[in-house]
Image (spheres, helix red, strand yellow):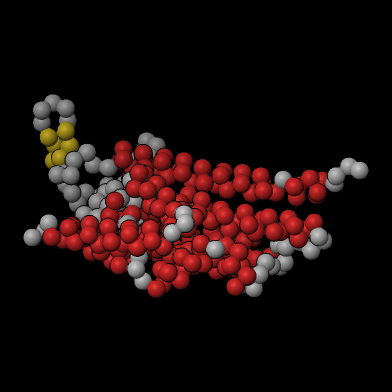
Amino acid sequence: MKDTALETLLRRDRAIVVAALITLTAISWIYVLWLASAMDMAAPPAASGTMDMGSGMDMEMPMDMPMNMPMEAQGGSMTSMATAAAGPWTAATFAYAFVMWAVMMMGMMVPSATPMILLYARVGRQAAQQGKPFAATGFFAGGYLLAWTLFALIAVLGQWLLDHALLLTPMLSSANQALSGAVLVAVGLFQWTSLKDRCLRQCQSPLLFIQNHGGFRREAGAAFGLGLRHGLYCVGCCWALMALLFVGGVMNVLWIAAIAIFVLAEKVVPGGRLLSRVAGVVLVMAGLWQLAAMT
């Protein structure tokens, strides 16, 4: 007896979900790499505010010069973000920054959410085979991504505040050693808090999370809400680590990758709680070293 199209699709759902997650992550990282490259090209060539003209002479560049003016060449919009500290933010600047953060969060967090999403897809397939289908996996994943999109909005507001206080470099890293040290210490201490423990437990045990929050859902809205709740727990677990982007550079691709790998390790490596505590100690020590170096 020939399989129906639905039965064939159900057997391939895992491959479809994996392919979708890989594609989303790849697109996000390609965008981040392109954006980092564009911002690096747009950044001033020297921190002192001088431009090397290649003739043995330096031309002074006024540091208060509005560098978010449109450029005729490709990447002009990236200059608006990379040098926002040199001029007032506009609606376009805010929109560009929000897209940057939202896409970056997807690229960083989708890999760590993959076990939960695949579990939902597998159980959903089994339920469909029994004639009791759940809502599509995409609704659950969409709720998760919405949580990090909301976080992106908060991150942009934080960037704007730091920018307004002249605490960011054109490459969106801390321009103040005291700020860097304080952030490192604060993030390190957060790694030891009970809030970190509670949220991380929800992320480490996908099946337990679903069972503790009403089980799998048949309604699309309920599945979306379940994914949103999981995403909010994930934000609660990792928001402080994202603050480290302002220390190493929001557009530092190696720094972004290191944080993403650590977030994944916390959730999937046995003993991830110990890993987060050890990292907390290292971060506090690094922050104290930064602060001590100021004296």
Q: Residue at x 16, y 61 (%)?
A: 291
Q: Relative to 208, is 35 above or below? A: above
- Of residues 169 and 252, the one nearer the viewer is 252
Kindly give the residue lying farthest to the right in the view shown.
Answer: 1
- Of residues 73 and 105, the one nearer the viewer is 105
Quadrant in which the C terminus is drawn:
bottom left
- Is 287 on the left-hand or right-hand side of 295? right
| Residue 237, position as x, y percentages in the image | 43, 65
| Residue 174, position as x, y percentages in the image | 24, 55
- Is 126 on the left-hand or right-hand side of 85? right
Residue 248, visible in the rendered structure: yes
Tell me the quarter of the picture where residue 49 sits: top left
Q: Relative to 291, is 37 above or below? A: above
Quadrant in which the N terminus is drawn:
top right
- Of residues 10 and 197, the one nearer the viewer is 197
- Is 270 on the left-hand or right-hand side of 215? left
Q: Residue at x 23, y 64 (%)?
A: 182
| Residue 286, position as x, y percentages in the image | 22, 57
Kindly give the residue lying farthest to the top in the view shown.
Answer: 55
Q: Residue at x 79, y 63 (%)?
A: 132
Q: How many marks?
A: 0
- Is 61 on the left-hand or right-hand side of 161? left
Residue 78, visible in the rendered structure: no
Kindly give the residue lying farthest to the left in the view shown.
Answer: 295
Tell me the quarter of the picture where residue 79 sits: top left
| Residue 44, position as x, y percentages in the image | 23, 42
Q: Residue at x 13, y 60 (%)?
A: 292
Q: Relative to 133, is 63 above or below? A: above
Q: Relative to 43, is 230 above or below? A: below
